[in-house]
Image (cartoon, grey):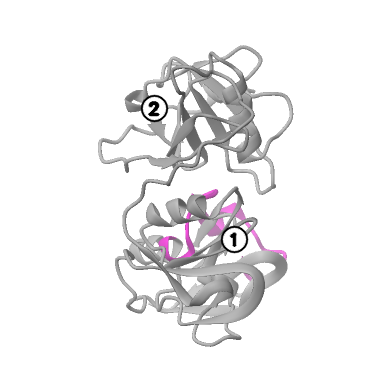
Amino acid sequence: TGVSTVSTTSAATSTRSAPVIFPPIEGGSANWAFHLGLNCWEEHGAVSLPDANPLLGTYTVEECRQQCEMNPDCEAAVIATHVSTPTFPCFLRTSVVIAQCRSYADFDVWEIQRTPSTTSLSSSTTSTSVTSTGDFVPIDGGIDRACRGASSGDNNPIYYVIQNGISDLDGCKAICVIDALCQGIEYSTGRCELWVRPGGIEATAAVQGFICLRYTGAPTTTPSPWSFVPVDGGVNRVCRGRSPDDNLPSHYTVAASSGMSLNQCKAECAALAGCRGIEHNQGGRCELWVHSIGATRSLSGYICLRFDA
């Protein structure tokens, strides 16, 4: 089904962050305005193009943008990011009015900014810098360095959120700039880690093909004010109630199905009366547990933490 069936209860916001401008994709000529956590559909800022609600199959972020650029009527590509796979449903939109679109955690909008003379992919690319605020500085030289926590061996998965399908370093930087908790980035081809460790990036390790940069515009590098304790080691564990099979939906509230950083998930728990802990995965899903966490089950990419209020 198309996204026109999505509930319209999510209100537009006047405090939405400004979009980040990306350069053309490979073989393209148009710049792109990236709107994180936004959705545009019928009667909410856009009209669906025929046979593109969504397109047949799934696509990487770049492939979805290519489909939009090749269609002269396309004004934006909407990507459903709630699925935890390398490719995503791709929706093509026209008659786009961004101010009428809705904030929506599971979707991102890539608004195409075509040059007057070109409405399709060309054989060359134009080099354009990503518009962003703040600066990024190399750590230990930056090149061929992977980011670490307190020491070169400290690479706990809770320190970062992985963004796949990011085509270049500038794209990774841009995502960091609009994440309020991002302290820096680690980038390798197509893979971007947003480091949200409260103490920041304090060390690196030599790994060929990686780049580690500290974001100097990060709001803080002070320790988190909340105390969360790993359950059964925490990493690669999902939370459960009385036993590893006790996963009743009433035990938790889903704060976000994707796109939420670990620290944001912690903050949601700290603000919720009766929150007993969190389950978070690398795709940004956040469960706020209101039932006592007495057990866990092994599952790669997840973390289970008990809230010590």
Q: Residue at 37% across / 46% down in the picture? A: 131
Residue 163 figure quarter: bottom right
Where is residue 121? Give x, y as percent.
61, 25
Can residue 295 be seen by looking at this rendering? Answer: no
Q: Name which residue type carries label 2.
A: Cys
Specify the label residue 101 is tagged with: 2
Specify the label residue 163 is tagged with: none
Specify few, some or many for label 2: CA neighbours under 10 Å numbering under 14, 14-19, or 20 or more. Answer: many
Q: Secondary structure at mark 1?
A: strand
Q: Residue furthest left?
A: 14
Classify the position of the N terminus by image quarter.
top right
Classify the position of the C terminus by image quarter.
bottom left
Where is residue 154? Give x, y as percent.
57, 83
Q: Residue at 59% across / 20% down in the picture? A: 120
Q: Is residue 2 above or below residue 183?
A: above
State how far apart marks 1 and 2 are (Cα).
28 Å
Q: Is residue 165 left or right of residue 48?
A: right
Can residue 261 be seen by looking at this rendering? Answer: yes
Where is residue 164? Give x, y as percent.
62, 52
Residue 149: within the magenta? no
Q: Is residue 250 above or below residue 107?
A: below
Residue 249: within the magenta? yes
Q: Name which residue type carries label 1.
A: Asn
Segment tinted magenta in the rendering: 239-264
Where is residue 183? Give x, y as percent.
41, 68
Q: Is residue 205 above or below residue 282?
A: below
Q: Which residue is mark 1?
A: 281
Whichever of labels 1 and 2 marks the residue nearer the N terminus, that label is 2
Q: Is residue 41 left or right of residue 56?
A: left
Q: Residue at 56% across / 25% down in the picture? A: 3
